[in-house]
Amino acid sequence: MAEAARDLGHDYMVLTDHSPRLTVANGLSAERLEQQLDDVARLNGELAPFRILTGIEVDILSDGSLDQDPALLARLDLVVGSVHSELRMDEKPMTRRLVTALADPHLDVLGHMTGRMVTGKRRRPPSAFDAEIVFAAAVRFDKAIEVNSRPERLDPPKRILRLAVEAGCRFSIDSDAHAPGQLAWLPFGCDRAAACGVPEASVVNAMDADGLLAWTATHEKAD
């Protein structure tokens, strides 16, 4: 994946495997995540000046807590939090769930926030939540909303993405790649962001690696 990202012209990538709760994706236990941190340090020595930033896509549990040891999350460069369960939760508890996650100092990016699927066998509608409240929380805690580039997700929908722009949110345009070739999906998210008026200055992964790390460091990740 790192070599493919480098060949596409990127200066860095963020490695965000899933957390333990998502067993279907072989989510990382604390022990396996610890090992991955060692592996990334070794690979960065081999791939320099290209950089792999450490991260995770952690499950947002039903109460808004994050599915990984807080001490480990504090060691990561970037944490994406996503809802993968109870997607049909009622609007008020889902809103509370997302706001609680955004308030967590370990979380940096809210991933595929509506959970919708627009193609394939897993097609499903967006989750229900109060977008204005969620986006106000994202601005309050200076967290980013993911623009997910996977063709079957394209999340959030354009109507909701425009609301996030109006609210003044930051954004992270992500490939959500699970294989090297899927890194080429990134332009799909860029096109959606441009169509909805997302300012380039608000896109956190348009920064260089040091700029991105300086932003995540403001979230006071100490355990």
Image (cartoon, rainbow, N blue to C red):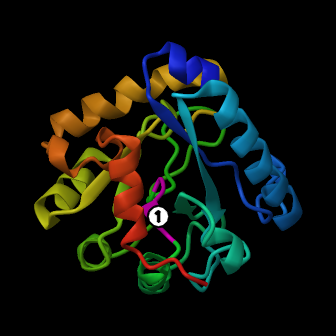
- Viewer-closest of 205 and 188: 205
* Residue displayed at 55% across by 81% down: 222
Look at the image and give the residue range highlighted in magenta. Answer: 107-112
Q: Is residue 169 visible?
A: yes
- The residue under label 1 is which amino acid type? Ser
The answer to which image quadrant residue 220 occupies is bottom left
Which residue is denoted by mark 1 in the rendering?
Answer: 127
User: Residue 89 placed where, x, y %?
Assistant: 55, 76
Is 172 situated left or right of 84 in this image?
Answer: left
Asked if 103 appears above or below 168 in the picture, the reply is below
Task: Name the image quarter holding the N terminus.
Answer: top right
Q: Where residue 15 appears, x then y in whole percent?
A: 62, 44
Q: Quadrant of residue 21?
A: bottom right
Residue at disc 1, secondary structure: loop
Residue at 17 percent of width and 34 percent of height: 195
User: Which residue sits furthest right?
Assistant: 31
> Badge 1: how crowded within 10 Å, few (<14), some, or many (20+)?
some
Asked whether 94 or 67 is in front, the reply is 67
Asked if residue 126 lies in the magenta stretch, the reply is no
| Above or below, 18 relative to 90 | above
Indicate the position of residue 188 as horizontal and vertical percent values.
37, 27
Residue at 58% x, 64% y: name it. 83
Does the rendering let one see residue 146?
no
Residue shown at 50% from the left, 70% from the top: 107
Q: Main secondary structure of the magenta part?
A: loop
